[in-house]
Amino acid sequence: MSATLRIVDVINTAASAKEILLDRARQFHCPPAVENWIVCSAGDHVDQIRRAGLPVAVIDTPRGLDPAALTRATWRLVRFFRRCKPDLVHTHSSVPGVVGRLAARIAAVPVVVHTVHGFHFHRGSRLPSRVFSWAAERALARFTDVLLTQSREDLRVVCRWRGVPARCIGNGIDTERYARAAHPHAGPGRMVACIARFEAVKNHHDLLHVFARVHAACPQARLRLIGDGPLRPACERLAADLGIAGATEFAGYREDVDTLLADVDVAVLLSWKEGIPRGLLEPMAAAIPVVAWRVKGNREVIRPSQSGLLAAPGDLDETAAHIVRLLQDPALRARLGGAAAERVHRRFAETAVVARLRDTYGSLLREAGYVLPAHWHPHHAAQSHDQRTVLSA
């Protein structure tokens, strides 16, 4: 074993690496004792991650299911792992989870961890994708030392698979950053916002149709879409076709999401599936009431009529009615927004997630025969092991 403990996170895009992993990895990266590498596809955020002091390897992972592309990505990762010699590989999301776990086992990485950011076998996905995702997750679970979920509903799915070590790690944000953006507004609401990458699972298509209904009922309403992605041009065309282009702001990818939330009255997320969505946690931490579909992940974040409003998946009329109700009722916005902020600060702080992850890594590395660095906080290990036993039963 090397004197340096090497952790490697594998994720698809550089934007996801920056948003999901950067702050977390910086808390583990403590050279020369511990190095935390990030492997992701090329993108604008790679240099930013490197400037933050983290080592990055650029290895593209396909976003589709092309067998040749998956094979190429797997062997690129095998070669990198053999050079880097990681002690622990942690993969994130579906495709990186497939190629990353296979490559890690081929390269004889001692510890392999995978985080499910919401399973892809869900309503709204295509049948081939659902079948592949379900089969891949079941098969690859055998190559995984522990499978981490963000939501307890996904954990219950894994526990039905028998013999797959699993635990719910949750998801969290820098709650104080968004609390500073909280500015509840009196009077009729105007600004509706969505924080999400433009990809099929985030379902901007239905969101734009919902907002067309909202705008008809509340002509003052405006929609701010924060994020970027391959489906943005199609959504811009759809907004024009629906006659709401003048009321829709495509803000693109932004570093200052907290600033953009300052004038927002209602946040909305119509994803077909989620883990624990940052697109809800961030506005909720800023005391903004939220509307979302009643799917896994969302159900765990929102307490209906207490910290937000849930609508049936696919019910555009109910979704629009919830948004209109909030825009027209400042007292309801204030009540739900205040409860949302309290819930996120209590349940979804990033610091708690990092502590759980540190315990998880520590227990797995000890089982593999490692002696951990002195700064690893080993006093949490016993609690972590107990949690793993209970959640894997």
Image: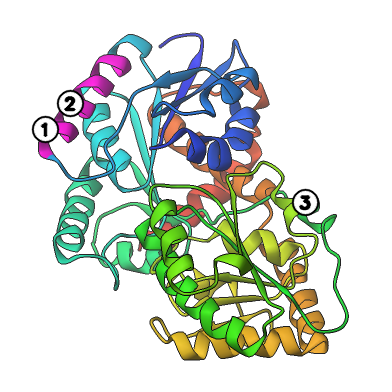
Helix, strand or loop at label 3? It is helix
Please identify the quarter of the rendering in which residue 160 is found: bottom left
Residue 222 seen in the current view: yes
In the figure, 173 relative to 288: above or below? above
Give, as a three-letter code, the residue at label 1. Answer: Ala
Q: Residues under labels 3 and 2: Cα distance?
A: 41 Å
The residue located at (74%, 59%) in the rendering is 261
Q: Is residue 125 magenta?
A: no
Q: Amino acid at mark 2?
A: Arg
Disc 3 and disc 2 in contact, CB within 8 angstroms: no
**Residue 100 falls left or right of residue 166:** left
Q: In the rendered image, is residue 304 in sight?
A: no
Crowding at mark 1 (Cα within 10 Å: few <14, some 14-19, many 20+): few
Highlighted magenta segment, given as a residue range: 67-81
Provide the major secondary structure of the magenta segment.
helix
Q: Earlier in the sequence, mark 1 or mark 3?
A: 1
Reading the image, the residue beneath label 2 is: 72
Image coordinates for residue 28, horizontal then vertical, percent: 60, 28
